[in-house]
Amino acid sequence: MKRNLGCGLVVAILLACLAGAQRVGEAAPDFRATDSSAQIHKLSEYRGKFVVLEWHNNGCPYTRKHYESGNMQRLQKEWTGRGVIWFTVISSAPGQQGFVTAKQENDYLKQMSASPTAALLDPQGDVGRAYAAKTTPHMFIVNPNGVLIYDGAIDNKATTDQGDIATATNYVSQALEEAMASKPVSTPTSRPYGCSVKYAH
Amino acid sequence: MSDRLVTRVTCSVLVGAVGFFLATVTPAENPADEHVKVELVSEKDAIVPTEQVWLGIRFDLEEGWHTYWVNPGDSGEPPRIEWQLPTGFQVGSIEWPYPARLSTPPFVDYGYEHQVLLSVPVLPPSGLNEGTTAEITARIHYLVCHDVCIPGRKQLLLSLPVKNHAAPGANLLLFEETRKRQPKATPKGWKVSAASVGGEFLLTLKTGKLPVDPQFFPLEPEQIENAAPQNVTLTPGGVQLHLKKSNHLLKPLSRIRGLMVVSGTAYWLDVPVSQSPRGVQMQFMKN
């Protein structure tokens, strides 16, 4: 009787664990989201390609570090040039820092010379919550089989200082290089650093 | 004409360069100043050769704003201090007072509201001349957040006279209060163990008497889910804390390190994590 109770609890805990957010090595949650040009994107439509998800808030000093230095744009250009799908995802709720209309986002992309494949507008936070996106930036990589292979920071220098970019290890580029060479990703998770994602309360 | 253009271009480049230089060094250009006052302070009013003195950075934060502990939790960044001290002075690292759990669902950060002192021990050398002044500089980088975050950067100066005797400084009480919030070694009578059980770490504390309001603060990021509630179970002679594992933890954890705060006092914990599934069932059967 007691033993059964014990086993039951263990099973309950295991189930609770499985019900949690995705992990690296598991299938990335599928999503459907509208971009700033009113196109609808479904993650599962991009099987066969690497997909990068970049959580974004244009007012956050950590996001600004990587845009005002041109670092994020360089990454977008390089990796989309190599066949990667790059989604900038904006999960700021209306009234919160980083919330943008489609037009505002298109103006921003133009002004910053940013070239993600698309900027996904997620004001309800559905995509953000499915991935447990915590910070801006917070980066995820999905491999051509739809498996999550990276979840974490953009690089290993958790500061707002643009001067740190040159000497930082960029975890996104490192993971993509390794995965494209069929090598295991050496740093599959890291602490994402930045401002908290401004979800609706 | 073209000469004048060249001159004008050169001038504007120079002015631009000077402007950039000023922008990076002038405290008036520090937007975080609106929400936090930072000051370099000393526990004593003078430097005495070979006598340890505590210096610190005092943050006075506007209501609703916070800064961060060494592990900031789900977002944010801890303050950093670069010291410039006269020759021969030795400086220790920050003795972080224990933080508060700052909850903004779905996130939890670890940090400080209202006021915090980040103090360090400083040891002056022998052979300092009485009547001279020790000039101490701290360059600090920090982040303050409310709904939004603002990074700050400042250079703080403190001049202290060299004397053969020091009296308490104006911030003595703050240093004393801060010391009460700095973690202590685990008491000898405690028995602490940790076990990895499915999606949780179970931290078992036998303290002899019932710990009031136990809370665990992980020293390392990405080991536990910061925002998960830390459920507490009473056990004979102590408590058991349920800590949800981080999704980012891909390998078994060999040790768990952090602060255990009970009854308003923080203790350092550094315990091996047992992976035995047999131990798991035993723990459940006891309940």
Image: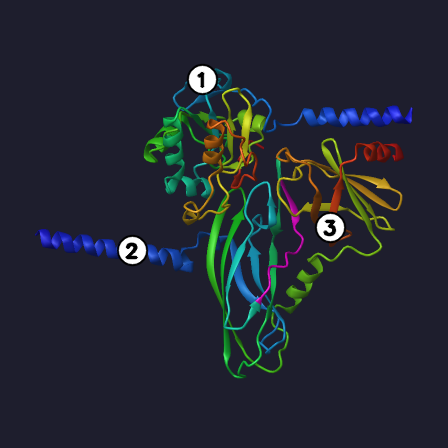
- B97 is within the stretch colored magenta: yes
Instruction: Identify residue type, mark 2.
Output: Ala
Q: Which residues are magenta?
A: B91-103
Mark 3 falls on what kind of element?
A: strand
Quick check: B213 above or below A7? below
Q: Position of residue B273 (x, y in %)?
A: 74, 41
Q: In percent of the image, x 45 and y 17: which residue is there?
A: A40
The residue to which callout 2 is attached is: B17
Left or right: A22 as drawn, with respect to A143: right
The residue nearer to you, when weighing B276 against B36, is: B276
Q: Which mark is residue A181?
A: none
Q: Are marks 3 and 2 on the same chain?
A: yes
C-beta proximity under 8 Å, tags 2 and 1: no
The residue to which callout 3 is attached is: B269
The residue to which callout 1 is attached is: A40
Quick check: B166 above or below A20? below
Rendered image coloring scheme:
rainbow
